[in-house]
Each structure stands twice: as structure tokens, then as C-alpha cells.
Amino acid sequence: MQTCTTAFGSLELERYPVTENPTLQAFDTADVYLLQTLAEQPGADLPVLVINDHFGTLACALAKANPALKPHSWSDSELARLALEANLAHNQLEPDAVVFIDSQQAPQGPYKQVLIRVPKSLALMEDQLSRLREHLTDDATVTAGAMLKHLPHAAGDLLAKHIGPYQASLAWKKARLLTATFDANLAPAKVDLTTEYSLPGVSVELTNLPGVFSRDKLDNGTRLLLESLPTAVGDQRIVDLGCGNGALGIKAAQLNPEAQLVFIDESHAAVASARLNFARAFPERQAEFLVSDGLKDMPPASVKLVLCNPPFHQQQAVGDEAAKRLFTQSSEALDAEGSLMVVGNRHLGYHVKLRANFDKVEQLAANPKFVVLKASR
């Protein structure tokens, strides 16, 4: 637990999932800068909207400062929602002190004040700004913040395109803000930020909503894992873990026509994309689609096969903690004869990490960059 001092008071905050790295915090100076700037503005009698609030720092501070005016938090991330839930509890705030809105829902405005953490995906940011505009008051301000090293120039261009003219702040402790004022005369064209590409061996185009991993082309690691998928799972359960657009699960479904497919991702946009793609590929077939923290809620020993191309970052933090959690969750969800098939960059050394949870680890395929491994008991 770490203390974050803001213009709206102090908070006790923790990352979710809890990290083994003591140098990682649940907040940074961009969060503090956003809150400081908001505190200097005249108060409003409307809820503040926060967007892409990674660990609930912004929403918790606002909820603590004014419990009667619940802030709204709009995010694509289930991990962000769980972090918000945990940090509300850490600060003795009620679970409903913040209204959470997932990315596949529209925000509930009107809003006069909006705070945005600039996401890694500019397609996601443009989608959010485009959809946000109709929910703003005529005198609204939209302030986007990021650490300097993670702030692309195009973020300002998107604010100007969809909201109105913006000003960049001075840098403060390696953070910068971009504040846009609503221009009622602006008439931005509607944008369709979905992308499509083909899946080898399957007669379906994969649709990717804004923010989905590998939305412009099939990831090369996924492509290698596709070539190793089994065909003898029968009517057992196959989980596409961290499913993205559902490529692995859809191909597995084609190869195993009797299997039960489950698609899981912490991204609402990813699960929505997978649901759309599976329905297009197999209109007569049923599957499960879960927005979840991995296999956390999957019953023990209930899965025959897990397919996974693990993420190696959470927001801007790069590491193998996410992969190791998914490996542990997989070992608990698999039945006695089940297996996990995973692909990763060679340098990540997944063959060593998998042995912490599995007795047998074998290599199924490899190329100069990626390796496909199968882990079982």
C-alpha cells in the first residue's frame, strides 16, 4: 500500500493485481497533476467523468472529496474496475461511491469536467472522444494527462478534432496535461475505427474494435500458435485466455467441432470483438464470453485445454507478472489430463516459468523470435 497526496486529500492505494515489484505504484504524477488542475477550476454540480483511470486514483480522490456527487469512471479494463473496487475499500469508501461504465456502454452525461489518462492505443482514445462529445455541456473542459515519455503528439490532434481547441500545460515532474475547451460549432465526421483482417484457414474476417490487441494484423506469435492447435479435444472445454479478437478460439473451434469454447479477456472491447467474430464464423454454435481477471472465477479442474498468448505489460509497466499469474490460474483450472498451450518471445523464458506450476513442459514449434510450449502435469 502506498500513500498518494492529492489536491482532494490523501489516499491509500494499491495496484491490482498486487505487484511483486516495489517500484511500481498505483499512481503517478500525471494523476496528481490532473487532480490539482481540476481543483483549481470552479466547482460544478455535475459528476466528473474520468476515463482510463488505471487503478482508481482519480475516481477515489473525487469520491472522497465529495461523496454526494459520485464521479463516473469509463474504462475498457476489467482490471481497472477491480483496482477501483479494491481502492475504494482501502479508503473506507462505499462500493457504489463511483459509477463504473465499461467501454461498450455510452457515458451517462452531461459532463462539464472530464479527466482522461491518455491510453496506449490512440484508436481507443479517438473512439472515446468521438463518443464523448455528445455527452458534454457547452462549457465543458476535457483534460488529458500522461507522463511525457508516454504522451504522443497525436493526442492533442485528437482533442482538437473531436472536442475543440486545446492548450498544453507546462511539464511538471515529467507529466504534462492537454486541456481542450468544447467547441459547439465543431462538426467532426463520424469515425469507424474498427479494422478487419482474415484468419488463416477460416473463412471469416476478424473484426477488431478500437483498443483490441493486434488490431491491424494478426500477431506473429498468435500465427505460430495457430499452426500447433490440436484436433482431438472432443466435447471438452477449451479456453482462449486473453482472447483479443478470438483468433485462437475460433480456429480451435473449427478443428474441434464438438468442443465447448470459452473466450476470456480483461478488455471489454476484446470480448465484444471475439463474440462478434465467433458468431460470424459459427452462427449455429454457442460459446461463453467472459470479461474477467483471467481464469480467476473458473471452477477448478473444469478445463481440458487453455490457449494463451500472454500479455507482457499492464498499462506502461513491462514484465512477466501477468504471464505468471495466468500460468498459475491455468494450472488450477485444468483437469488432471489438461494442458496449457502458450506462445511467447524466446527471451521471456516461459519454459522455466511454466515449471513452477507444471511437471511437463515441451516445445511444439519455434521460429527465430517465438516459441510455442505445451505444459501439463
Image: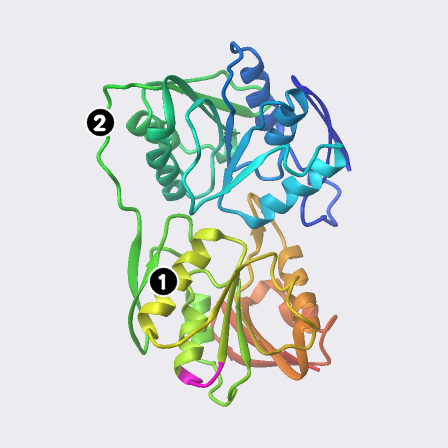
Task: Give the residue pinned by disc 1.
Answer: 276
Q: Quadrant of residue 106?
A: top left
Depth order, front residue of 103/161 = 103
Type of residue at label 1?
Answer: Leu
Q: Residue at 56% across / 62% down in the picture?
A: 310
Q: Residue at 65% across / 43% down in the picture?
A: 83
Depth order, front residue of 362/216 = 216
* Residue 42, percent from left and from top: 52, 9
Q: Is residue 113 above or below residue 318?
A: above
* Residue 50, percent from left and from top: 52, 31
Task: Give the residue pinned by disc 2.
Answer: 187
Q: Secondary structure at mark 2?
A: loop
- Mark carried by residue 83: none
* Magenta-tinted stretch: 255-259
Q: Quadrant of the C terminus?
A: bottom right
Q: CA distance from mark 1 to mark 2?
A: 30 Å
Residue 77 visible (yes or no): yes
Type of residue at label 2?
Answer: Ala
Depth order, front residue of 311/205 = 205
